[in-house]
Image: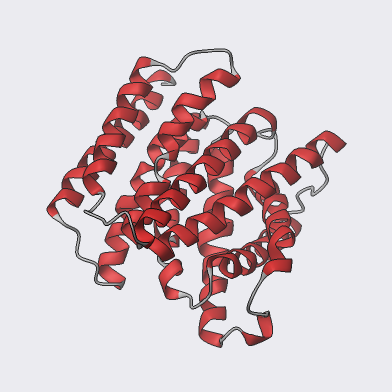
Amino acid sequence: MQPQQQSLIYLHTAVLLFGGTALFAKLINLNALDITVYRAAIAAIAILILLLAQKKALKLNSAKDYAIAVFLGITVGIHWVTYFAGMQMAGIAVGMIAFFTYPVITVFIEPFFHGNKPKLKDLLSAAVVMLGIYLLIPAADFGNDITLGVLTGIVSALFFAFRNIIHKRYFSQYGGPQTMFYQTVVASLLLCAFIEVPVMQVSHYDLGLLVVAGVIFTATPHSLFAASLQYLSASTAGLISCLQPLYGTFLAFILLHEQPSLLTLVGGTLVISAAFYETWSVTRKHR
């Protein structure tokens, strides 16, 4: 199997698991920051156990790389907090849609890091994605929490896009688990001083969900996502990741009984079409 094809498998698996992450914003009875701290700490422990079991190196190559790791941890921590906060304020569907402006942000930002202009095919794919996202957005009164949720989701998108680009350019020489270990450690340490509910006061129900969120829906997909960036551009990863709101919508329908509208189905079809076109384009290029 070609490295690019393996990276696509990693990416699609990660996106499927990412799609279920949004549900924890509603299932866990904690605020967004507390969820982020405990989720990141649990994920860091899980990744550390994996690295030790596989006898993988924890040490980075240079002091510069440690500085980059800290920066990536800060960006991913802010991304997670705003991600969950957006969904708690605006709901899962609207929150995820607002966050998924990040592929478009990535498409426009990444080429400038290489001194290039965005490619026409990426601009067209981004336009299709934006149209799909527009159709997914329900009617909303911009004087309530939905507006704040949308804005918070866009902030989350900006930090996530920036994190992916910096990782691809300066940190892709490291494996996915090693990369995410440092980012989850930094994110949890950075935010732990601001938690409202100490761990001893977290209910057994919420603690169980946090373990599931940290191990299955954080450590695993983020490690796979980071590994996929070794052979895929951040723009490609971002556009393929547009499957995530569709997975999230489906899981919300099954588990939370949220009924998708006709516009949701139409918009979802557009998003999926753009994602699969990008996958096909990458596969054909490296065949």
Q: Does the image show residue 257?
A: yes
Q: Quadrant of the C terminus?
A: top left
- 172 w.r.t. 112: above or below: below
Name the residue at the right extreme: 63
Q: Does the image show residue 2?
A: no
Find residue 105 and report its horizontal and vertical position in percent: 46, 33
Find residue 276 and report its horizontal and vertical position in percent: 30, 35
Residue at 42% from the left image edge and 47% from the top image edge: 99
- Residue 130 left/right relative to 78: left
- 45 w.r.t. 137: above or below: below
Residue at 64% from the left image edge and 28% from the top image edge: 169
Find residue 246 and report its horizontal and vertical position in percent: 30, 51
Residue at 52% from the left image edge and 80% from the top image edge: 206
- Asked whether 183 or 152 is in front, the reply is 152
- Residue 172: which quarter of the image? top right
- Asked whether 209 or 14 is in front, the reply is 209
**Which color mode does the image show?**
secondary structure
- Residue 219 left/right relative to 13: right
- Residue 75 left/right relative to 124: right
Residue at 41% from the left image edge and 45% from the top image edge: 12
- 246 w.r.t. 275: above or below: below
Find residue 251 and report its horizontal and vertical position in percent: 31, 63
